[in-house]
Amino acid sequence: MDTGKLTNTTVKAAFEAWQKGDADAFLSFFTADAKLTDDGNPRDFQKFVKEACGSERFTSIDKVEAAGTAIYGHFHTERWGDFNTFFKFHIDSAGKIDQLDIGQAG
């Protein structure tokens, strides 16, 4: 997959770790108390990563917004099938991701 559209280096590195199914590498880009929302609802971030990383992935990147921190594209999950989704990364002043918002995109 072409990740050339990803202009934020932190987001790009985290995204590539996600795509490879490397949960430890993915988590290394986040603060210890990172938050997760799924379609606007709070979820357990650590549990989500442990359950989803390696079995869920983007199959295409359709657009990138918000200075490279919001990724929209087609997504595949073994549990729920294929659909359009977004990952929106929030980066703190120290350069770590402190929140990830995910959900279905229209």
Image: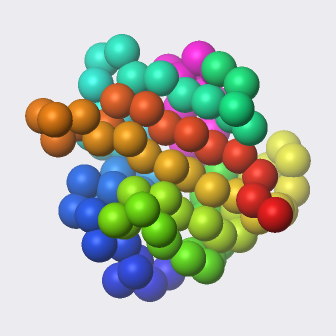
Identify which residue, 87 or 40, lies in the foreground.
Answer: 40
* Furthest-left residue in this view: 94
Q: Is residue 100 above or below residue 36?
A: below
Q: Is residue 34 above or below residue 73?
A: above
Q: Position of residue 34 (x, y in %)?
A: 40, 23
Residue 92's quadrant in the figure? top left
Q: Is residue 24 visible?
A: no
Residue 47's quadrant in the figure? top right
The range drawn in magenta is 43-54
Residue at 74% x, 38% y is 39
Q: Is residue 55 above or below residue 6?
A: above
On the rendered image, what quadrant is the C terminus found in?
Answer: bottom right
Colouring style: rainbow
Q: Position of residue 53 (x, y in %)?
A: 55, 42
Residue 47 colored in magenta in the image: yes
Identify which residue, 91 or 24, lies in the foreground.
Answer: 91
- Residue 85 left/right relative to 79: left
Q: Position of residue 100 (x, y in %)?
A: 49, 38
Residue 70 colored in magenta in the image: no
* Furthest-front residue in this view: 66
Chief secondary structure of the magenta portion: helix
Residue at 35% x, 30% y is 98
Q: Position of residue 45 (x, y in %)?
A: 53, 23
Residue 93's quadrant in the figure? top left
Residue at 65% x, 70% y is 73
- Residue 47 left/right relative to 81: left
